Image (cartoon, helix red, strand yellow):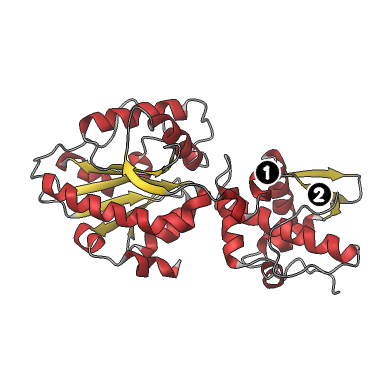
């Protein structure tokens, strides 16, 4: 058995299937404080430590693995090895940068790290949600449904707070604030708010908000994206005013949210986008001149989805990793979503 090479990402990726890799990546990225980049680094590190531990014990790992198991105990891993694992497929980061990433993963409770003055050793923390095999997380049927502000606001607010956490580091009051904003919006016009709902316990697992926008607010779509944030920032006034049914001057709809629980993103995104298509067609009865769609990709894990659906970047933010994205309503509702999302 050959020793694992930290920079050979292709060999590490062959240890698990693409489907399983994406499942783990989604579950990890869904944890509070995680970004997709941190999740990728953690998953690469896990695979490398598994391969290295097996080599040290003279064992061969069966590939592909049915699921990831914990490496036995502590495994030596220098900052140089970690840098190869994290950065070998891009402009290489420094050993110091890799050390900082290890510290971040430790602070997030994903790994334990010790240094005896000579060597760094790492142990993967046991995470129950990652240890369950794929068949063990199967649940009841899931169906799109109307957003219920009385029952759905709090669980959806907590789901959205995780999505926004990487932008807003002070999140103590965010779920409470988001829940109140969603209820206020629903009082004005709830037709554009939908959830993915479990049919057994009625819990929501996903949410989108199609927000018809008054003409006077359209200029905001051409200003820095950070000025359009509201759910994730503490601001007393919403920068966007909602249009009400019958407003013939309303030409724009703002996709203010589109989120699915990470464990169901891959298998539910197509039908949820199709549901959004149908809902947008229905909204055109209330707003006959609706023609423009805008959105902000808040979490990096949704960038590929937006691109696959034909959204084009328009204005980037000078301070935050945000950009406005645009798609024509007519083209969106006419799209073959299943075909478009095959490229992801």
Callout 2 crowding tier (Cα within 10 Å): few <14, some 14–19, many ≥20: many
Against 308, residue 153 (above or below) is above
| Pair 2/1: label in front | 1
Image position, residue 137 (x, y; %)? 58, 49
- The residue at which mark 1 appears reads as 128
Image position, residue 99 (x, y; %)? 74, 50
User: From the viewer's perspective, is 263 left or right of 76?
Assistant: left
Disc 2 and disc 1 in contact, CB within 8 angstroms: no
Mark on residue 122? Answer: 2
State the count of labels: 2
Asked whether the viewer can see residue 173, the reply is yes
Residue appearing at x 80%, y 48% in the figure: 123
Image position, residue 167 (x, y; %)? 49, 41
Asked whether the viewer can see residue 287, the reply is no
Residue appearing at x 33%, y 41% in the figure: 228
Q: Secondary structure at mark 1?
A: helix
Q: Secondary structure at mark 2?
A: strand
Residue 51 occupies which quadrant of the picture? bottom right
Mark on residue 285? Answer: none
Of the 4 image quadrants, the one containing the N terminus is bottom right
Callout 1 crowding tier (Cα within 10 Å): few <14, some 14–19, many ≥20: few
User: From the viewer's perspective, is 34 left or right of 76?
Assistant: left
Image position, residue 130 (x, y; %)? 65, 49
Residue that protrudes farthest toward the bottom in the picture: 2
User: From the viewer's perspective, is 320 left or right of 190?
Assistant: right
Residue appearing at x 27%, y 49% in the figure: 222
Return the residue nearer the eye: 48 or 278.
278
Of callouts 2 and 1, which one flags the residue occurring earlier in the amino acid sequence? Answer: 2
CA gap, disc 2 and disc 1 = 19 Å
């Amino acid at each position: 058995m050959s020793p694992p090479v930290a920079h050979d990402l292709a060999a590490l990726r062959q240890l698990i299937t693409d489907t399983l890799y994406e499942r783990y990546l989604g579950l990890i990225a869904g944890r509070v404080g995680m970004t997709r980049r941190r999740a990728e680094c953690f998953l690469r590190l896990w695979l490398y430590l598994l391969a290295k531990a097996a080599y040290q014990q003279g064992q061969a790992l069966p590939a592909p693995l049915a699921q990831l198991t914990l490496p036995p105990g502590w495994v030596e891993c220098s900052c140089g090895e970690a840098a190869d694992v994290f950065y070998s497929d891009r402009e290489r980061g420094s050993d110091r940068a890799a050390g900082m990433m290890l510290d971040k993963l430790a602070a997030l409770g994903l790994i334990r790290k010790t240094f005896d003055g000579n060597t760094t050793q790492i142990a993967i923390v046991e995470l129950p949600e990652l240890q369950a095999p794929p068949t063990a997380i199967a649940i009841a049927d899931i169906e799109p449904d109307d957003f219920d502000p009385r029952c759905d606001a709090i669980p959806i607010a907590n789901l959205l707070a995780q999505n926004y956490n990487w932008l807003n580091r002070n999140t103590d009051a965010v779920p409470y604030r988001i829940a109140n904003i969603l209820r206020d919006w629903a009082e004005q016009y709830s037709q554009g708010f939908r959830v993915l709902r479990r049919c057994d316990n009625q819990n929501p697992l996903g949410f989108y908000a199609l927000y018809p926008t008054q003409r006077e607010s359209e200029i905001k779509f051409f200003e820095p994206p950070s000025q359009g944030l509201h759910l994730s920032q503490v601001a007393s006034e919403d920068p966007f005013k909602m249009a009400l049914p019958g407003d013939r001057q309303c030409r724009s709809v703002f996709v203010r949210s589109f989120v699915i629980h990470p464990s169901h993103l891959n298998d539910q995104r197509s039908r949820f986008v199709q549901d959004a298509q149908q809902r947008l067609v229905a909204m055109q009865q209330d707003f006959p001149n609706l023609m423009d769609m805008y959105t902000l990709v808040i979490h990096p894990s949704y960038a590929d989805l937006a691109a696959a659906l034909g959204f084009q970047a328009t204005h980037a933010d000078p301070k935050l990793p945000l950009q406005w994205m645009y798609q024509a309503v007519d083209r969106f509702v006419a799209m073959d979503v299943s075909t478009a999302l095959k490229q992801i």
